[in-house]
Image: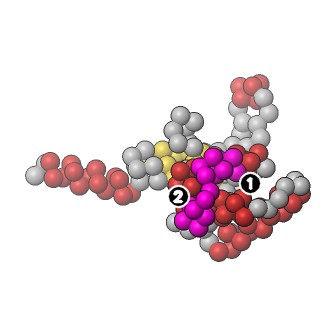
Amino acid sequence: MKASPEDFQLRMNRFRDVLARSGLKVTHQRVEIYREVAGSEDHPDAETIFKGVRKRMPTVSLDTVYRALWLFIDLALMTTLGPPREKVRFDANRKPHHHFVCTRCGMACDFYGARFDDLEVPSTVKKLGSVESTHVEFRGLCAHCSGQRNQKRSKRGS
C-alpha cells in the first residue's frame, strides 16, 4: 500500500526540516532511502527498502541503507515495530497510531484508535522509568490468511 500523496508530502517536508535543524546534509541517498519508507504503508524491513532504493540508485549499499535508517530513528523521523528477534520493520508515520500484524504472512497495517492513544500507564511501569510513548500491536491472521485457513479446513472436511 502507498501512503496518500498528502501524508507523503508532509513526511518529506518534515524530513528535510529535521535534517536541516540537525545540521545534517540532505543527501540524495538519504532522500531516496527516506522516500522508500515514507511512501509506503507496508512497514518495510531494511532489505525491502534496499531493493526499492537500488532500483533507482544501483550503487547504494545495504550498509548505507541501515546507517540511514538508524539515523532516521535517532532523529525521531521513524520508528520500528515488531519483536526485536524478527526482521526490524520501519515506519515513517509519526502520527499516533497502532498496528495489526499478521502472524502468518507478516503483513503490517496501521490503524487509528483514540482509545489506545491515551492508555493509562500502570504504576508498575512508572516505577521502571518514564514512558515516552505507547504503542498497541494486535497480532493474528489477516483476512487473506484467515481465508486460506478456512479454505483448507473446508477441503479437508469434504
Q: Is residue 54 above or below residue 136?
A: below
Q: What element carries label 1?
A: loop
- Residue 21 in view, yes or no: yes
Pick the residue in front: 28 or 39: 28
Spatial CA span between label 2 and label 1 = 21 Å
Q: Is residue 20 toward the left or the right of residue 13 in the image? A: right
Across and down, in percent, residue 63 comes to 63, 46
Local crowd size for mark 1, using a 10 Å CA cut-off: few (<14), some (14–19), many (≥20): many
Magenta span: 53-69
Q: Does the magenta stretch include residue 61?
A: yes
Q: Which of marks 2 and 1 is nearer the N terminus?
A: 2
Q: Is residue 45 above or below residue 121?
A: below
Q: Residue at x 52, y 46 (%)?
A: 138
Which residue type carries mark 2? Lys
What number is the disc on residue 51?
2
The residue positioned farthest toward the left in the image shown: 158
Q: Is mark 2 on a helix, strand or loop?
A: helix
Pick the residue in front: 125 or 12: 12
Across and down, in percent, residue 154 comes to 18, 52
The residue positioned farthest toward the bottom in the image shown: 5
Residue corresponding to mark 1: 77
Across and down, in percent, residue 103 comes to 43, 44
- Residue 117 in view, yes or no: no
